[in-house]
Image (cartoon, helix red, strand yellow):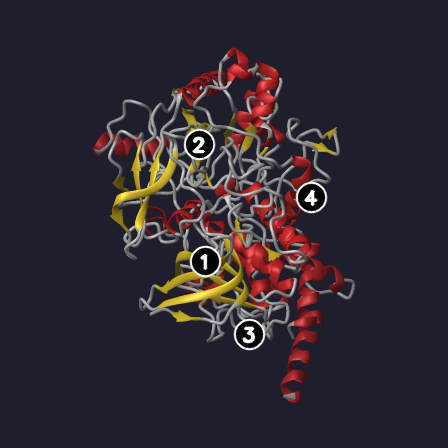
Amino acid sequence: MTMRLNTILAVATTFVLAAGVAHAQDDPKRGEKVFENCRACHAVDGRANEVGPGLHGVFGRRAGDRDDFRYSPALKRSGIIWTPQTLDSFIADPQKVVPANRMPYDGLPNARDRADLIMYMLQVFK
Amino acid sequence: MATKMKEVDVVIVGLGWTGGILAKELTEAGLKVVALERGGMRSTANDYSVPQVRDELRYVQRHDLMQNTAKDTLTIRNNPSQEALPMRRLGSFLPGEAVGGAGVHWSGHTWRWTDMEFKVRSLYEQRYGKNYIPADMTIQDWGITYAELEPYYDKFEYMAGVSGKAGNIRGRIQSGGNPFEAPRARDYPLPPLTTVLASHMFSEAAKNHGYHPFPRPSANASRAYTNPDGARFGACQYCGFCARFGCEANAKGSPHITVIPIAMRNPNFELRTHAWVTKVLKDASGKRVTGVSYTNVLNGEEFEQPAAIVLLCAYAINNVHLMLLSDIGQPYDPVSQQGVIGKNYCYQTGAGANLFFEGRNFNPFISAGGTNVSIDDFNLNWDFDRGNHGFVGGYTIGSGFNSALPIGYRPVPRGTPSWGKEWKAATAKWYQTAMNIGSSGSVMANRYNYYDLDPTYRNAFGQPLMRMTFDYTENENKMGRHAAEMVNDIAKSMNPTTFTPASVRTSWSVVPYQSTHNTGGTIMGTNPRNSAVNKYLQSWDCHNLFLIGANVFVHNASYNPTGPVGALAYWTADAIRNRYLKNPGPLVPA
């Protein structure tokens, strides 16, 4: 368990440094506010599947890989590995990046909102 | 032989908006509450998520969320001289079924009805004299005031996530809102939804006529929202699958994402689904109710649920039906005009024009419950002199899309064949280029519009069907002609390529869908001779029985009913918590 956690932390840190999306100045507190856009469907603790899948451990995972959630074929086929970068482009305009995905959300156009959101998600869904 | 269950403090019949609100409020007050819902359990994750929810055939054509007419329906006629026949397929109105009720499949329009309704008789008599109101128009003051309900409207709007723009905050007119609305304590919890091209064009035309357009208030969250109870809403996606569908984004204010889950987490609450209540039980004195009988519709097993308080929170029609089946109160008789149960059934009317603009793209599939713009110049505007036109009541006019579904939405100009190659070409040509201007009008109560038990037809439980006798009267025809004229004036001024003008609906038919806004039957009032319940929706006959829903409306306004239905549910919850429990008995002396 500790091993896995460390690995994930290392992965997350790598993302922060390498991805060019998450920066030290990104504000997870603000990101928590931005996550209000997601909370109606994604559980805050990241564990349970609600209308949307639980997001715990999402970074580093392949899109659509939870066995206990019914994803759209489009998302499963997408081949996306979730990193801060891929999430950033997806969440900016989900239908553009993965046409026919089933998430009922039209996207977050503001780059700062996305950066803060991703910083928050890196902290709570690691 | 029915199985007798353990007595509880409260039994709720029907778990939609009103049942959900009462369940939450009364379990929080420490009462043991059992809710009996005739349909099943439903949730966004299991039932309303994409893609299965975007199924017009299933939900619109086949009424998947609605009452099953094979189990129970109504018989219908236009007037007492006709023989009523059973409505075997839903049409004009769509009572919901299952947890969440009609609160799942409504479009979200949330209006505040004002003293213009609650004091209807006094207002018209004062201004136009006693003879202005026709003798067979059985309207009366409701016995409640807007000022009393204002905090409860506010509570409902904040709970249900209503998006809108205030027009009058504490007497100060707000630009961009409805200048005719009654004063509110504060603005809506959320800003209005984005309007669409059709509503924008209508708005400009209405302004040019000197009218006062404003965005229609609607429980579609214009952005992510957490309500005062902690329930979370997503932002409306303008997906176009709103009315008659559950919301895939948890953006539509609905009981299954707000009040019901809170009640369900409370150990004082128990929900039994597939439980069809057949009768409210009275004690020997007839002055108290003792509980209800119900049938498990999955296996036919019969139960009795004793309770200290019974709350009828089913659909408005079913609440009245249960009163008649349970022989509580005196059934209304239109000949002698004695009795109150079944009295003052009302509906709504309307007239609409279709406008076609070659070369414009309206993108009608982008829509929500609240992408419309309305005017109230012929509704809440008391300066509009009805005396010149000889009618009582009013109508709203509005435009903007609620839905433009692939099967049902096929606007074509008048004269187009209704099938074949030409129709196909026309529907392809005009789908993008059509818009509608609609009016929704009030219906005043009439002596001969009422409910009673059908003498012939019975439901799956062997009980007489509800019989509905209804038609529009000269009052609605006068108003409808005026509405059609105003709609057509606005439409012409917009210079469409062609348009199908609005015309008055002179007689009511149960076949085409019109609106699920059935009101009255157990009306509220100031004394047991003129009403079934007092201002706290408490039965005059049995003080531990409350009837919550549009069945208590004394007449029907042009507005959608859910605003006052929700406000009255909170109002009644308060009356039970703060007054009735301390001293069970009539809250108003008879």
Q: Amino acid at mark 2?
A: Gln
- The N terminus of chain A, quarter of image: bottom right
The residue tagged 3 is: A61
Q: CA distance from mark 3 to mark 1?
A: 68 Å
Q: Please, what is the three-letter code of the amino acid marked with disc 1?
A: Ala
For marks 4 and 1 on the same chain, the one whose residue lies earlier in the sequence: 4
The foreground one among A84 and B92 is: B92
Residue lying at 35% horizontally and 50% vertically, measured from the top left: B63
Distance from Cα at disc 4 to Cα at disc 1: 39 Å
Q: Secondary structure at mark 4?
A: helix
Point out the image quarter for the C terminus of chain A. bottom right
Q: Which mark is residue B348?
A: 2
Give the Cα distance between marks 2 and 4. Answer: 27 Å
Disc 3 to disc 2: CB gap under 8 Å: no
Q: Amino acid at mark 4?
A: Pro
Using the image, name the chain to which the residue with label 2 belongs: B
Q: Name the front one of labels 4 and 1.
A: 1
Query: What chain does mark 4 sit on?
Result: B
When the figure is inspected, residue B156 is found, relative to residue B527, above or below; the finding is: below
Q: Mark 4 sits on what residue?
A: B151
- Give the percent coordinates (x, y) of residue B179: 66, 27
For badge 3, the amino acid type reads Arg
> Do the residues bearing badges 3 and 1 touch, measured as CB atoms within 8 Å?
no
Q: Secondary structure at mark 2?
A: loop
Disc 1 secondary structure class: loop
Q: Report how far apart the C-alphas of labels 4 and 3 lie in the structure.
A: 49 Å
Foreground label between 4 and 3? 4
